[in-house]
Image (cartoon, rainbow, N blue to C red):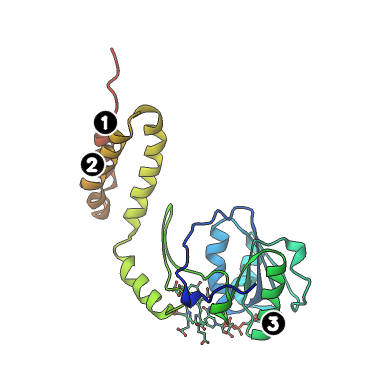
Amino acid sequence: MNSLPLSQASPYLVALNMVHKAVVIVGGGVVASRKIGALLASGARVTVISPMVTEAIRTQAAQSNLQWIAATYEPGLLAAYQPVLVIAATDDSAINQQVRDEARQLGAWVNDVSAPDEADFANMAVIDRAPLQIGISSGGASPALLRWLKQQLTHIVDVPLGQLASWMQALRGVTANSVTEQAERQRLYDEILASDVLSLLRDDQPEAARQRFEQIVQAHLPRERS
Ligand SMILES: C[C@@]1(CC(=O)O)c2cc3[nH]c(cc4nc(cc5[nH]c(cc(n2)[C@H]1CCC(=O)O)[C@@](C)(CC(=O)O)[C@@H]5CCC(=O)O)C(CC(=O)O)=C4CCC(=O)O)c(CCC(=O)O)c3CC(=O)O
Ligand SMILES: NC(=O)C1=CN([C@@H]2O[C@H](COP(=O)(O)OP(=O)(O)OC[C@H]3O[C@@H](n4cnc5c(N)ncnc54)[C@H](O)[C@@H]3O)[C@@H](O)[C@H]2O)C=CC1
């Protein structure tokens, strides 16, 4: 069954847990290379099927969770990998279409880099400040605009913000047991975010930022009984 073209719909954005999930990319050129870093970082098991690959893919195949099968795609090749996602990234749109057809038969979601409207998903522009990730989508409208916008947002979504995100993440482990009321937890988080913790991090004063953070947290924890 054919789905509605991507350009006529509003994609539903999700953050997929890809740990140990199989992804197959057919074609190993420049476009395929651009997608691989983020896939490996997600914990996916990536297989590239392509007679030739870029230097970057060759290096990654030697060092990481990436397998390179030096072969030309033939229908039937995908099944053995049981992929959840497939990227058809050759420079031949007829081959990409064969890949798409087989992926769908296997129940996998497929991205055809040469035919956005036929794809089940598109790749987003991502600013990675793990654990914080900012993904931007234009539904295929304009990759150039995405790249430009990403550049603008890079200054706002900066490295200190990622640092703060990891502190907030660790804090949730503490508050889950000690600050029992949701409203009180919310006040704590809001107070941290309204404070100068982030600006201290941005001013390269991590010690002062940490102290301020701890001070706010302590003020919200129940007092120890003596
Ligand atoms: C539909 C989609 C499918 C997909 O690949 O998932 C798609 C399709 C196409 N891209 C084309 C061109 C380029 N794309 C880029 C870059 C990116 N493209 C990405 C995503 C997507 N590109 C998906 C839509 C996402 C959305 O809109 O939400 C990014 C976000 C992520 C990524 O690639 O992983 C990453 C940029 C962000 C970053 O820097 O992170 C550059 C290089 C550059 O700009 O530096 C160029 C060359 C310059 C140019 O031509 O603009 C062409 C024309 C091919 C031709 O005509 O030859 C097509 C096909 C078509 O539109 O028909
Ligand atoms: N989605 C996007 O971001 C963009 C998509 N495109 C589209 O992506 C296509 C690919 O672009 P590039 O990566 O720059 O091309 P490229 O020429 O660098 O790479 C093509 C790769 O496909 C492999 N290949 C060719 N036939 C194959 C087969 N039968 N089986 C397996 N592998 C095969 C080649 O060995 C090569 O590794 C373009 O033709 C264009 O349609 C282009 C620019 C951006």
Marks 1/3 in contact by CB < 8 Å: the verdict is no
Which of the two discs, 3 and 2, sits closer to the camera? 3
Which of the two discs, 1 and 3, sits closer to the camera? 3
Q: Secondary structure at mark 3?
A: helix
Residue type indicated by callout 1: His
| Quarter of the image that includes the N terminus | bottom right
Residue type indicated by callout 2: Glu
In the image: residue 85, left or right of residue 170: right
Residue drawn 57% across and 67% down?
36
In the image: residue 4, left or right of residue 73: left
- The x, y position of residue 64, in whole percent, is 63, 60
**Disc 1 target residue:** 220
Q: Secondary structure at mark 1?
A: helix
Q: Rate crowding at label 3 as few (under 14), some (14 to 19) or many (20 or more) other CA atoms within 10 Å.
A: some
- The x, y position of residue 154, in whole percent, is 34, 66
Residue type indicated by callout 3: Ile
Determine the quadrant in which ligand 2 lies: bottom right
Residue drawn 59% across and 53% down?
19
Q: Rate crowding at label 1 as few (under 14), some (14 to 19) or many (20 or more) other CA atoms within 10 Å.
A: some
In the image: residue 74, left or right of residue 168: right
| Residue 78's disc number | none
Disc 1 to disc 3, C-alpha distance: 60 Å
Disc 3 to disc 2, C-alpha distance: 55 Å
The answer to whether the residue bearing label 3 lies less than 8 angstroms from the nearest atom of ligand 2 is: yes
Quarter of the image holding residue 182?
A: top left
**Disc 2 target residue:** 191
- The x, y position of residue 26, in whole percent, is 67, 74
| Quarter of the image that includes the C terminus | top left
Visible residue check, residue 128: yes
Marks 2/1 in contact by CB < 8 Å: the verdict is yes
- The x, y position of residue 11, in whole percent, is 47, 67
**Disc 3 target residue:** 95
